[in-house]
Image (cartoon, rainbow, N blue to C red):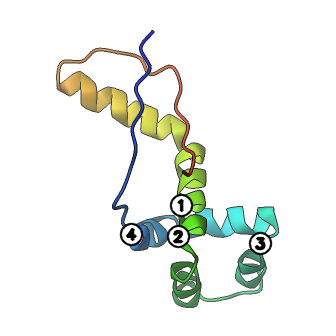
Amino acid sequence: MVKLEIELEELDYNMLIDNFLPQLSQHLRASGNPIGMLLSNGMGSTMAKGVLRTLSQEQKDQLTCDILNSNKEKLISSLEEGLEQKGFHLKVHSAAASAK
């Protein structure tokens, strides 16, 4: 088995917020985060996006890891398919994201 580590930088957090707002909202509510409580009380998506954009870098990184980990199967499938197109036939054993 071969272990491959990938570090990500220059993520477009605004795009992630736009694309994953429902998932972020659900995660924040489940974790008891105060922003999640605001979202539960009917905060509009425009206002919710604005609030999420004001989070600290560490909070954005952790939420991004949560999104990546909760979409692990989709990411693995996309990675395998993309690599197959480039001539690398392989099966990804596992994947996990963590904030540094």
Q: Could you tell me how far apart the alpha carbons at marks 1 and 3 are, in whole angstroms?
A: 15 Å
Give the amino acid at mark 4.
Met
The vertical placement of 50 against 55, above or below, is below
Label 2 is placed on what type of residue?
A: Gln
From the viewer's perspective, tell me whether residue 16 is left or right of residue 62: left
Please report the residue visible at 24 percent of the width from the left and 18 percent of the height from the top: 88
Residue 71 quadrant: top right
Whole-angstrom CA distance, mark 4 to mark 1, is 14 Å
Q: For the residue carrying disc 2, how many other residues have a C-alpha within 10 Å: few (<14), some (14-19), or many (20+)? A: few
Q: Residue at x 52, y 35 (%)?
A: 73
Label 3: which secondary element: loop
Tag 2, which secondary structure? helix
- The tag earlier along the polypeptide, 2 or 4, is 4
User: Mark 2 sits on what residue?
Assistant: 57
Q: CA distance from mark 3 to mark 2?
A: 16 Å
- Give the labeled residue for mark 1: 61
Residue occupying image coordinates x 54% and y 51%? 100
Real-space Cα distance between discs 2 and 4? 15 Å
Type of the residue with mark 3: Asn
